[in-house]
């Protein structure tokens, strides 16, 4: 008991009129002192929606496609608006912009802001695919692999053709899908060895791409 009393007497007394200072939370500290994430050398700044709008109004096809994507996703302070997204996609696609042609196919296949229309989706994907775009080629392969609806029935021959074109360009999603067709034996003789080889190559390409992006 004596030791306890002695300890209590030696504790520093708080001055009258003072209050305990609140502990600053980690979240508050981060808000006051945000971590800097400098842009890697050679990487251009991301344009604002206002800059894209100005360039799109002047007829820049890439700006029109990117502005459409911002409206589609409701990004960069813009409201989600499928009608405006379609408006800008169409303007860019009319100039042969591959990015916009893919996005048009995506909207029709989803039925975003409109009824689903796989005939239109295939038409737009083919515009990009015929220009060598692997994303469009892979999406065409997927529609034919699984079948869109009665207007675009399942067609393994077409699926294999488009998957292979994208896979030949080292597009990982196409390699995976092609591997699945070999694993299931759909349109080709069942071949697990080839299937595993394709999926391993897809994983290798993804890993290499991830390592490259981290090193920048």
Image (spheres, grey):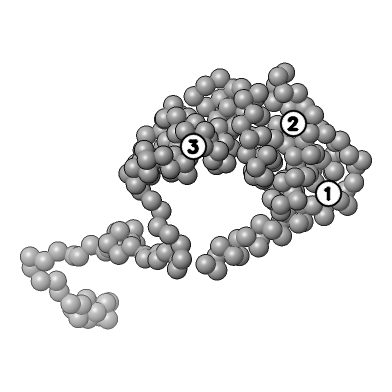
Q: Is label 2 in a helix, a strand or a loop? A: helix
Q: Which residue is located at x 61 percent, y 65 percent?
A: 211
Q: Is residue 68 left or right of residue 115?
A: left
Residue 188 located left or right of residue 48: right
In the depicted view, which residue is nearer to us: 160 or 93? 93
What is the x, y in percent for residue 214?
55, 65
Spatial distance from mark 1 to mark 2, Cα to Cα?
19 Å
Q: Residues within 10 Å of mark 3 (few under 14, many from 20)?
A: many
Residue with the mark numbered 2:
144
Is label 1 in a helix, a strand or a loop? helix
**Residue 79, quarter of picture:** top left
What residue sits right under mark 3 in the picture?
A: 92
Labelled disc at residue 195: 1
Label 1 crowding class (10 Å Cα cut-off): few <14, some 14-19, many 20+?
A: many
Q: Residues within 10 Å of mark 2 (few under 14, many from 20)?
A: many
Q: Is residue 84 above or below residue 196?
A: above
């Amino acid at each position: 008991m004596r030791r306890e009393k002695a300890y209590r007497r030696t504790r520093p007394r708080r001055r009258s009129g003072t209050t305990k200072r609140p502990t600053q939370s980690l979240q508050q500290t981060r808000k006051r002192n945000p971590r800097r994430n400098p842009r890697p050398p050679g990487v251009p700044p991301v344009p604002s929606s206002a800059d894209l709008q100005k360039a799109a109004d002047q007829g820049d096809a890439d700006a029109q496609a990117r502005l459409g994507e911002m409206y589609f996703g409701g990004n960069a302070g813009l409201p989600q608006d499928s009608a405006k997204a379609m408006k800008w996609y169409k303007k860019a696609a009319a100039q042969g912009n591959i990015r916009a042609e893919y996005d048009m196919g995506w909207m029709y296949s989803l039925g975003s802001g409109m009824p689903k229309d796989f005939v239109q989706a295939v038409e737009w994907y083919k515009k990009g695919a015929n220009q060598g775009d692997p994303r469009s080629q892979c999406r065409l392969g997927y529609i034919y692999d699984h079948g869109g609806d009665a207007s675009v029935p399942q067609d393994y021959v077409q699926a294999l053709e488009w998957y292979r074109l994208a896979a030949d360009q080292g597009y990982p999603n196409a390699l995976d899908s092609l591997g699945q067709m070999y694993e299931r034996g759909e349109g080709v003789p069942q071949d697990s060895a080839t299937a595993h080889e394709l999926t391993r190559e897809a994983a290798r390409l993804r890993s290499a791409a991830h390592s490259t992006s981290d090193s920048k």
